Amino acid sequence: MTHELWIFLIASLMATSCALVGSLMVLRRMAMIGDALSHTVLLGLVLAFMLTGERSLTVMFVGATVVGLVTVFLTDLLNRMGKLQKDACIGIVFTFLFALAIILISAYTGEIDIDQEHLLYGEIAFAPFDTFEWQGQDVGPRAFWSLLFVTVANLLFIVIGYRHLQTVAFNASLATALGMSVNLIHYALTTMVSLTTVASFEAVGAILVVAMLVIPANTAYLFCRSIQGMLIWSVIFAIAASISGYYLAVWADASISAAIAMMSGFIFILILITVGPESVIQKIKFRFGLNRMNLS
């Protein structure tokens, strides 16, 4: 398999896994939590490495998941005890834990084999060279297999818990009245976002993970009327941004991650001005008494 094809596969899996959980986060108005998790899991990686001396996927997943859950718990705790706004609580917890991770990396820079710039900005072009061996055979990039595992896990999570996720996303009070555990679903979703983040940003960087968690989901949110439509269209937009961003990076000799994030923003603007609620097309349809476009 060619180097370019591996990059496409890794970028597409990253985009798909981020778009799936990102849509659920956006529907629950938790987009900023995704931003916070994509940074605070760095502390989980550092602590996991310091405690075990290993960089295996299992150790990294456990460390990132624990810190991700701590992030959400502390945010909720500040919100309840301090009576602060949710976004303010996220800002306090996110910056505190992220700064702590940077200090630990700086203090133990000679012992910790983790580069904060690599984790922030990533370099997907190098991902195909970090391969995984199974029974002595090279079976491809480690990033591909970890992202494939997380993407399948996200799909199973959504399929199995779809009814609960849908109810909690649109009406948490109704979910509670129906006997659903809103907190359990909340922390389960947080766990999946943490797993997605740690699987993604070692290859593509935290900045692109934030972009893929938020932008494709909000692009689909502009016109979709159902959760199924939003999930499907967010994945389509994320993959389209990955492919177009790659060719833009090759053409401009620029960072692939930055180009993918930029194309994702470009697609958002394109959809906003063409089929968004206040788009020119919608105004023309309203002017002539036609119904809103239905692409969902």
Image (cartoon, rainbow, N blue to C red):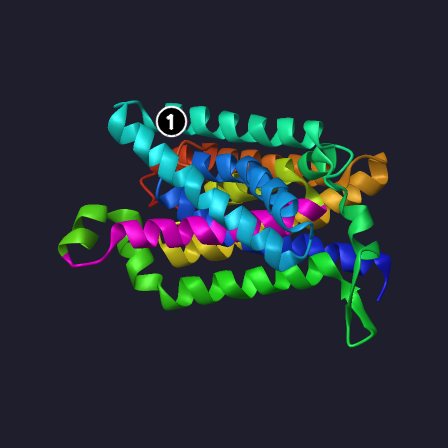
Give the residue type that dot 1 points to: Cys
* Residue 234 shows in this picture: no
Near mark 1 (Cα within 10 A), the count class, few <14, some 14-19 or many ≥20, is many
| Residue 219: % across, % down | 49, 41
Q: Residue at x 61, y 51 (%)?
A: 60
Chief secondary structure of the magenta portion: helix
Q: Which residue is drawn at 60% across and 59% down?
A: 58
Residue hosting label 1? 89
Residue 9 lies in what quarter of the image? bottom right
Magenta residue check for 189: yes
| Residue 223: % across, % down | 42, 45
In this rendering, would 105 be left or right of 188? right
Q: Which residue is drawn at 62% across and 63% down?
A: 148
Which residue, as the protein is rendered here, is positioned at the far left?
177
182 vs 290, nearest the viewer: 182
Provide the secondary structure element on which disc 1 rests.
helix
| Span colored in magenta | 178-203
* Image: 112 above or below 10: above
